[in-house]
Amino acid sequence: MIDTRLIAEWEVCSRILLALPEETTDWNYVLHEARNQFARLIQALTDNGEHCIVLCQNLAEAESLLSGCDSTLLTLVEAPYNDTWTRDYGPITVQRGDRIRSLDFGFNGWGLKFAADKDNLVNLFLHDNLLLDPGTYCNVREFILEGGSVETDGRGTLLTTSRCLLSPNRNGGRGKREIGERLKEYLGVEHILWLDHGALEGDDTDSHIDTLCRMAPDNIILFTGCRNMDDPQFEELLKMRAQLSLFRNMEGEAYNLVELPLPDPIFDVEGNRLPATYANYLVTERNLFMPVYDQPANDQLACQTVRIAFPDHKIVPVDCRTLLLQHGSLHCSTMQIP
């Protein structure tokens, strides 16, 4: 029997998949601002040696927008898609034996909340246009799974949230046991940590793990904390921290918990709180791209904190305030493709 292993994000990263905001996406009301946001993000990625596959709907406009980026690190592709959150509809990568497999799970707009008919076909498009290495594509589209909903240490442990994966609008109300069996079958994980607490106001993903907690080398879990007892999120995040303290790895050891600060509240023009979080970073083999929100003290503390887990990585802050307007951040906008 060939062993399957879900790859940790920091292990291998040869390309990063993104999709530019277009008039046909939910960014149309702030299109100029949103395109500039993605241009800054892609500039930061390419300036630090990361190769980007960028989906767009007008090649000439994309070339103009990204003219300041190193063209040798850019692959621009015209493609149909609904929106820009490639983390959740891009391929999830496992290692099977000595080969990489790109798993194409079903995507239904975070439990039928938003249109996703084109997003759900993006991985087939990548396969058909040879943007995924030949022979790596694997169709598992009958099972709904978003990349932002799962975290791994690359050693057989999966961290996720019951609120998301057990949502009845994703996999028909299947229970924890059946969902767990599917995750073990598809991803090769042996040990699943189900987080039952933790939620951010404005989050419409049903508590994706990449907004709350992230696994890191050396038995570390970075998590979003809250020190303000008057914050409406305080109780949920406190319960989350308590549950994390009870988790054990496959060897029965407690995790080293490292607390990330919670950004000061950020609101949209209608007064709704947006789900700002420092846990939504992207880590590659050598870089860590940290979302920041023009909050110097919090931003600096977050960048210093992740160094505990990734001391040899270059920390690259990227202003992500515009991404918040559509309730996402940096990690949500990217998907690594080894």
Image: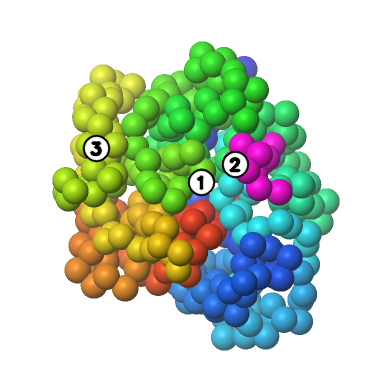
Q: Kindly identify the amino acid type of the residue bearing the numbered disc 3.
A: Glu
The numbered disc on residue 110 is 2
Give yes or no for residue 113 being in the magenta stretch.
yes
Identify the magenta region. 106-115
| Gap in angstroms between the C-alphas marked 3 and 1 | 19 Å
As displayed, is residue 287 above or below residue 242?
A: below
Secondary element at tag 3 = helix
Residue that label 1 marks: 204
**Mark 1 crowd level (few <14, some 14–19, many ≥20, 10 Å Cα):** some
Q: Going from the N terminus, do you reach mark 3 or mark 2 first?
A: 2
Give yes or no for residue 256 being in the magenta stretch.
no
Q: Kindly identify the amino acid type of the residue bearing the numbered disc 2.
A: Trp
Q: Tell me residue 187's x, y (percent).
A: 56, 29
As displayed, is residue 294 above or below residue 305?
A: below
Of residues 204 and 300, the one nearer the viewer is 204
Residue depicted at x 69% and y 37%: 106
Residue that label 3 marks: 235
* Mark 3 vs mark 2: in front: 3
Query: Which residue ends up furthest to the right in the rendered image?
Result: 128
Quadrant hosting residue 152: top left
| Gap in angstroms between the C-alphas marked 3 and 2 | 25 Å
Query: Which residue ends up furthest to the front in the rendered image?
Result: 270
- In what quadrant of the picture does the N terminus appear? top right
The numbered disc on residue 269 is none
Q: Tell me residue 282's x, y (percent).
A: 44, 56
Quadrant hosting residue 281: bottom left
